[in-house]
Amino acid sequence: MKRIVLLSHCVLNSFCELPQAPDNLREEILKVIIDKNLSIVQLPCPELSYQGLSRSSIYPGTPEAEEYEKYCQQLLSSVVANIKEYKDNAIEIAGIIGIDTSPSCSIMDSKAIMMKVLMKELSDEEITVKVLADMPVEGDGEKFFENIKVL
């Protein structure tokens, strides 16, 4: 079976954040992905492309959140089209790995702006995802790795 995993941008590229996202778990995440024979789709970093490196996060419910959400919809349109193409060609979306505490890219926080948009778009296309997990921003990630073992 062909399967892919969707990764928040900074899981693989810690330079897209200032201060840098922790990358101490990157090697272990990649080992799991390789061991499970998964391919990777790296999601765009919405905050980097919207505001650059020196930025303030945009939080749900703030005045700029509505415009930012529309931006995320545009940003994700080609990603969702690609994911639909994968589905139409029997390639399963095994999981999505977000970033813990991110106001844009936490997959476990239903209010995180970009992931909320992504999940709605996937639902509209009737695309299911089995594993949803957030890479922790601190600690050893023991619970996180327990969650993604089932990828």
Image (tube, grey):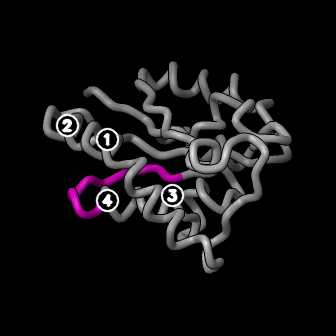
What range is drawn magenta here? 123-132
Amino acid at pointer 1: Ser
- Residue hosting label 3: 114
User: Disc 2 or 1, which lies upstream in sequence?
Assistant: 1
- Residue hosting label 4: 121
Query: Which image quadrant: the N terminus?
Result: top left
Q: Which mark is residue 85?
A: 2
The label nearer to you, 4 versus 1, is 1
Amino acid at pointer 4: Glu
Label 3 neighbourhood size at 10 Å, few (<14), some (14-19), many (20+)? Answer: many
What is the x, y in percent for residue 47?
Answer: 63, 49
Front residue of this view, candidates 148 and 18? 18
Report, in whole angstroms, how far the alpha carbon at label 3 lies from the one at label 2: 21 Å
- Residue hosting label 1: 78
Amino acid at pointer 3: Met
User: Disc 3 or 4, which lies upstream in sequence?
Assistant: 3
Front residue of this view, candidates 151 and 61? 61
